[in-house]
Image (cartoon, rainbow, N blue to C red):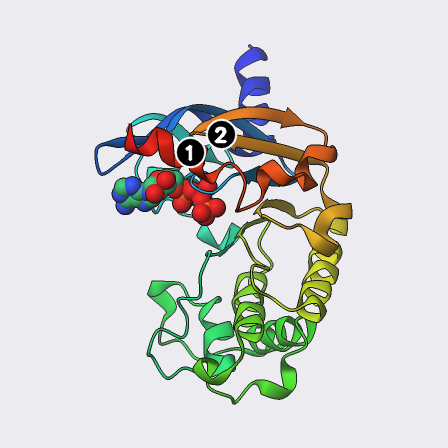
Amino acid sequence: MTAPKNAESDTAAKAVQVTDLSVDLGGRLVLRGVDLQIRQGEVVAVLGANGSGKSTLIKTVVGLLPAARGEVRLFGTPVPRFRAWKRVGYVPQRITAAGGVPATVYEVVSSGLLSSRRLFAPLGAARKAAIEDALRVVDMADRRKDAVAELSGGQQQRVLIARALVSDPELLILDEPTAGVDLASQQIFADAIRERVARGTTVVMVSHDLGPMDALIDRSIILRRGRIVYDGPPHASQTSAHVHHSHGASDDLGWLTS
Ligand SMILES: Nc1ncnc2c1ncn2[C@@H]1O[C@H](COP(=O)(O)OP(=O)(O)OP(=O)(O)O)[C@@H](O)[C@H]1O
């Protein structure tokens, strides 16, 4: 029987599989019947107005929110049973690394290599080299001893990006990685992503303003009111007004308060 084998390898070739996903937040369906398949090596932008459900989708994909209906699989494994988190790098929407905890740049980046089981294991040479590489890629090597809380927003974001890159994940999931980030940092970030994409890394990125990342995108998803309303090649709409913060928000608010 070859069919099940083929089906299985096909499933494994998908970095992300979202099937009929609905997510309920505070009694409100924020995602409704979302289907999405992302093949390994694809670079996908998730676009949509404020409140359309982009962050909710990303958080559910990385297992931070439960599905009310449907399922998410990472590399073929349902997220509740997925354990290979080393294969996934995640940059959250807002900085959580600083959060009052006095951590240095080096500490935050190195935390990207530590699974809970190995928290107290000393860093080997390979791990140290990986940290140096990630620091270099985001141009923060000379700030390694600085407290993250003392950095600018853009620099903090670079640290989080380095933290996501340090384990050299096969799948990078980025929630507005360059929001509020200066253009120089955006460029550094785009170069870092380009390097990973050339090596086959899958990227899923939420963004209001793709900036220098624009050229890397090979597919856009547009969410509206918790549903996918466009899934295809990037086109003019990704930079048009309706995916930006200001426009469309009141429309979505109307739905939320109804
Ligand atoms: N914990 C929660 N309880 C109830 N509703 C929530 C909760 N978190 C988010 N929401 C609502 O769900 C909707 C989708 O939020 P989400 O953050 O996924 O949107 P988004 O597209 O990422 O928006 P933004 O562009 O502003 O980041 C929003 O309208 C938000 O107000």
Q: Is residue 109 above or below residue 19?
A: below
Instruction: Work out which quarter of the rendered image holds the N terminus and state it.
Output: top right
Instruction: Work out which quarter of the rendered image holds the C terminus and state it.
Output: top left
Callout 2: 10 Å neighbours few (<14), some, many (20+)?
many
Q: Disc 1 and disc 2: Cα gap in Å?
A: 8 Å
* Mark 1 or mark 2: whose residue is earlier in sequence: 2
Query: Is residue 124 found left or right of 71 in the rendered image?
Result: right
Residue 224 shows which numbered tag?
Answer: 2
Q: What type is the residue that disc 2 sits on? A: Arg
Q: Residue at x 73, y 37 (%)?
A: 218
Circles 1 and 2: CB atoms closer than 8 Å: yes
Q: Is residue 108 above or below residue 143?
A: above
Dividing the picture into quadrants, the one containing residue 38 is top right
Asked whether mark 1 and ligand 1 are closer than 8 Å, the reply comes as yes
Q: Residue at x 44, y 66 (%)?
A: 95
Residue 41 on image: x %, y %: 68, 40
Q: Residue at x 43, y 29 (%)?
A: 225
Query: Is residue 214 found left or right of 165 in the rendered image?
Result: right
Q: What type is the residue that disc 1 sits on? A: Asp
Residue 80 on image: x %, y %: 33, 39
The residue that mark 1 highlights is: 252
Ligand 1 quarter of the rendering: top left
Q: Residue at x 49, y 78 (%)?
A: 123
Q: Secondary structure at mark 2?
A: strand
